[in-house]
Image (spheres, helix red, strand yellow):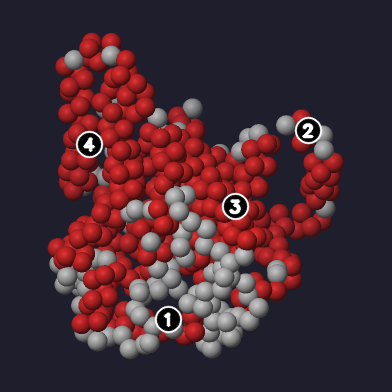
Amino acid sequence: MFSIQESFLFTFWTALCRAYEASALHRLLVAAGRWSNRRIDESRILDVLCREGTVARAWSESRTCKILSFLANLPGNLLHHLYTAFQRQFDQSIFAGLAFAMGDETAVGESWVIMALWIIPYKRWSNGYSLLGFAALLILFYAGSMRRYNTFRLDLKSVGPYAAGMFLAVVLGVALSTYPSLSARFLMYHSACLLCVLVTVSAVRNTGDFKRLAAGGSAVVLVSSLYAVYQRIQGVEINKSYVDVDVNAGMPGRVESFFDNPNTFAQVLILLLPIVLGLMLCAKRPVFKVIAAGVFIVGVGALGMTYSRASWVGIACAMAVAVFLWKPKLIPLFVAGCLLAVPLLPSSILNRILTITNTSDTSTSGRIPLYQAALATIRKSPVTGAGLGIDAVQQFIKDNNLYHAKAPFVHAHNIYLQVWIETGLLGVVSFVGAMLLNIKNAARTVRHCGDSAARTLTCAAASSLCGIMVCGLADYPWHYPRVMSIFWFVFALCIAGTKLCRQCEQEEENR
């Protein structure tokens, strides 16, 4: 640490910061930030958007929430009664003490599980790993609640009504599917995500737990990004199914790391890069800041090498939201930095950006028949959809002759359309409601919360969700179940961070 502080680069950076603090530019940006804050505080539109809805307010005291909480915590409750009946024997057992200690540190176990699961190469990956991993974490959580049931329960209240409605829609998506046999296996993927949300929201009890999970996600970014850099050094063959070589002449092959598809890898980075940035901002020791900054830089470089345009737009949105939530006064500086960075972009990336609206690009024009087929499916079955899973949707579209392009129909290339045609009207309403409620709660909480690591990481998680939702307008991130589990992991981090921030507010009020 002392060698870093005594270095020329650190001295130069410190002098530059002091000069900026005393500059007219700093005073101008501060004034602009204050003006922005006043406009935000006085905005009637934002006041309506940030207001807690009737359904959300009624959820925690509703009979449905209480019944679901009882059922989810029933194993822990039974184990607690068993512990109470034989407390002396359990307290004298070395193995029971070890199980209790491990259960108390479920968040630590989860950080290792996600690091192990999400860097497995695609050829060796099985979608059952996620279900097994999070089921093991649930058992570990129950072991912790066996002794501390009063303070160690699964928290369904914080998960919210819309996320519960989403899982109900998933179950109905199998029961009401046009092809139940094709839909059944997809229930396993969503069940793994449900376990991920429940365990993550419930296991995070303090800022230390929150930072450990963020560090686990950062390790995934580091390992996968370094492998992507290795791929670039070795050379990546251009896959014509990913790139229109006529419109994107001179563009190199797209890296995909461990995820079989460059767009999929880019979506993983959208979800986790803001978390890495948040970890860098809240790190207390300079050496950890430097490490996190290095991971972030490598991750951004890897994202650039994916040449995924929807993901670039998504990460730009995520960064803008992160600045807006974290320190709104930096918005003018962020905009200026973005404009100044454009001429510094590599020509291959700049040319790729310019093709976003080019209808001659087959990857852009090819989405139109996909959207048309998805909309035709909605018109034919608007309430129940075709059935859960890509397989059922593909079969429904084929049987009803709703798709007429040369390339095969894989998915709708739009997360909102795909969720609708898989889970019906209840699914898409619950999905959008869950995302909006989570982001809205996070934004409202961090707006009135003092600076802390929990606040910074909550801003990061909320911005990740915003970024992936924007990316989802032109792609379907859940095509790979592993990305779906990462999506819901970040969703749960946002809820857990919001809960921690509220706890900090209450503690300050009680002082």
Q: CA distance from mark 2 to mark 3?
A: 26 Å
Residue on which disc 1 sits: 367
Crowding at mark 2 (Cα within 10 Å: few <14, some 14-19, many 20+): few
Q: Is residue 1 left or right of residue 300?
A: right
* Residue 291, disc: none
Q: Amino acid at mark 2?
A: Ser
Q: Are marks 3 and 1 in contact (CB under 8 Å)?
A: no
Residue named by callout 2? 3
| Image disc number at residue 226 | 3
What is the x, y in percent for residue 373? 31, 83
Q: First in sequence: mark 1 or mark 2? A: 2
For the residues labelled 3 and 4, the Cα–Cα distance comes to: 41 Å
Q: Residues within 10 Å of mark 1 (few under 14, many from 20)?
A: some
Among the 4 quarters of the image, the one containing residue 321: bottom right
Question: What's the amino acid at mark 4?
Answer: Asn
Q: Residue at x 39, y 72 (%)?
A: 414
